[in-house]
Image (cartoon, rainbow, N blue to C red):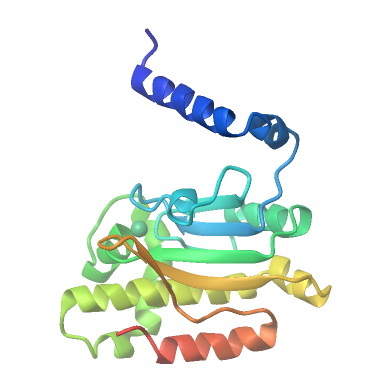
Amino acid sequence: MSLLAELFSNNQAWAEDLSSRDPQFFKDLAVQQRPEYLWIGCADSRVPAEELVGLAPGEIFVHRNVANVVVHTDFNCLSVMQFAVDVLKVKHIIVCGHYGCGGVQATLRGDRVGLADNWLRHVDDVLQKHQSLLSGWQDETTRLNHLCELNVIEQVANICKTTVVRDAWEHGQDLTVHGWIYGMSDGLLRDLHTSARSMESAKTAYLNAVNSLPE
Ligand code: CO
């Protein structure tokens, strides 16, 4: 018996189920993928990208990291974006954060978690930038939720400023960047109304979103 046998048997059942419903499914998938969406989300095990938007393999291109951060020097994330935009021609890039994010919480509390502290410095930049806005909420959970939202809004702005997205827009490519947040306690997504289809709309959407955070 192989190690982690349960996972292999789950996989077999999953593949058989999909094949029985569509015998061509894996044959088509092996030849090409045509996703319309790039998802950039948190690595948190409770936020499974494909599952919570009901998409099948081949329909969504996914990049996940701690606290769904997009940094201009991160060639991992930038490479995913470049491939998704230039080669796969995705029409939408979605940054999806989630309430109760451990990375955002550690930043807000100033907790030390180890190596990841260096990565979370990027979330700390968001915290510093919006310090006065955040200090308006006394309750820690409310402040955490709003920092989770602001972190998404800032990452959307970062994406809009990458060479990948700027070049795509300059070439007239149909590409929209969105900021969403997921509630683990109800399983629902919320749009943070920071969607941008051009450099101009990105600036307006950013300001509107920061000034009208959800209640
Ligand atoms: Co998280």
170 sits left or right of 159 in the view: right
31 sits left or right of 203 in the view: right
User: Where 69 sits versus 205, above or below?
Assistant: above
83 sits left or right of 10 in the view: right
Could you tell me which quadrant the C terminus lies in? bottom left
Q: Quadrant of residue 3?
A: top left
The residue lying at 24 percent from left, 87 percent from top is 135
Q: Position of residue 31 (x, y in %)?
A: 75, 34
How many labels, in total? Answer: 0
Residue 4 makes an appearance in the image: no
**Extreme-top residue of the structure:** 1
Q: Nearer the viewer, residue 140 or 108?
A: 140
**Extreme-right residue of the structure:** 171
Ligand 1 image-quadrant field: bottom left
Q: Position of residue 23 (x, y in %)?
A: 64, 29
User: Where 157 sits versus 114, above or below?
Assistant: below
Q: Nearer the viewer, residue 41 or 123?
A: 41
Residue 15 makes an appearance in the image: yes
**Extreme-front residue of the structure:** 21
Q: Position of residue 134 (x, y in %)?
A: 29, 85
The residue lying at 29 percent from left, 60 percent from top is 184
Q: Position of residue 82 (x, y in %)?
A: 70, 57
The residue lying at 26 percent from left, 70 percent from top is 108
